[in-house]
Amino acid sequence: MSRDYDYSEDMFADTRMSFGEHLEELRMHMWRAIKGFLVALFFSFFIGKPVLQVIAAPVEEQLEAFYDARVERIAKEISEHPGEYETDQPKEVNLDVDVRSLQKTLGLQSVYEKLKLKPEAGSGSQWVQIKARINPHSWTMALHKAMRQVGRRPGLTTLSIQEAFMAYFKVCIYCGDRAWQSVDFLAVVAVCRRRSLSA
């Protein structure tokens, strides 16, 4: 059984628009997209810093692991080849020491006790300078973890405030763009669902 179709009818006649109408439709959608993006960008400024921290966290973890591995490698090399590093040669340093504490620690009698004299008023502690020798690398490695906790941890740095702001701004733009695209996609899905239910 053959059917006769009338192909002369235009299926899209009711949706046809002139060039000007197309431009007007494009302008309307462009303004809607720009407004939606700006609203999403405004809200993304509040979540930009936490998102930036989430992005930077794996890099900072790897930086810390790198520096820890470097300290362990140098410590191993120094223990295997002592005296090879010129920077680890013993260095003389001056240390200030409280005389009374030193005498008590060494179990020595003070001059006042030997001569059975009373110390002068206000002479609670007397400091002297003594010379000592330290190995710079050994001291640095011994204090490595403590310095990391108290001082500045290795991490991402920027050379200028503009660079830091641009990184933050780019993250905010990306978050705002993703948020607006998600809202736009959900709106399209809602319209399609409403049309399918009404049909």
Image (cartoon, rainbow, N blue to C red):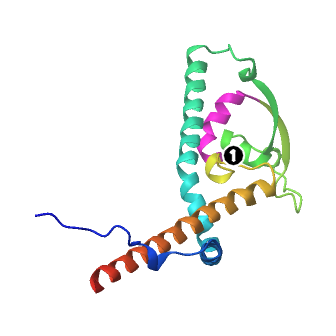
Q: Secondary structure at mark 1?
A: helix
- The answer to whether any part of residue 63 appears in the image is yes
Q: On the rendered structure, is 188 left or right of 193?
A: right
Residue 7 in magenta stretch: no
Image point (74%, 20%), residue name: 89
* Position above or below: 62 against 196: above
Q: Is 180 rendered above or below residue 161? A: below
- Determine the residue positioned at 66% across, 48% down: 156
- Identify residue for label 1: 104
- Residue at the (15%, 63%) spot, across then down: 2
Between residue 53 and residue 8, name the one nearer to us.
8
Assign the N terminus to one quadrant of the image: bottom left
Asked if residue 14 is positioned above or below residue 168 in the image, the reply reads below
* Circle 1 Cα neighbour tier, 10 Å, few/some/many (<14 / 14–19 / ≥20): few
Q: What kind of residue is marked 1?
A: Lys
**Percent position (x, y) of residue 74?**
60, 25
Q: Residue 22 lies in what quarter of the image?
A: bottom right
Residue 141 lies left or right of residue 112; in this view the side is left
How many callouts does the rendering have? Answer: 1
Residue 163 % position (x, y): 76, 54
x, y (%) of residue 67?
60, 36
| Residue nearest the viewer, comparing 108 with 148 | 148
Q: Main secondary structure of the magenta part?
A: helix
The boundaries of the magenta stretch are 133-147
- Quarter of the image for residue 30 reads bottom right
Q: Is residue 140 magenta?
A: yes
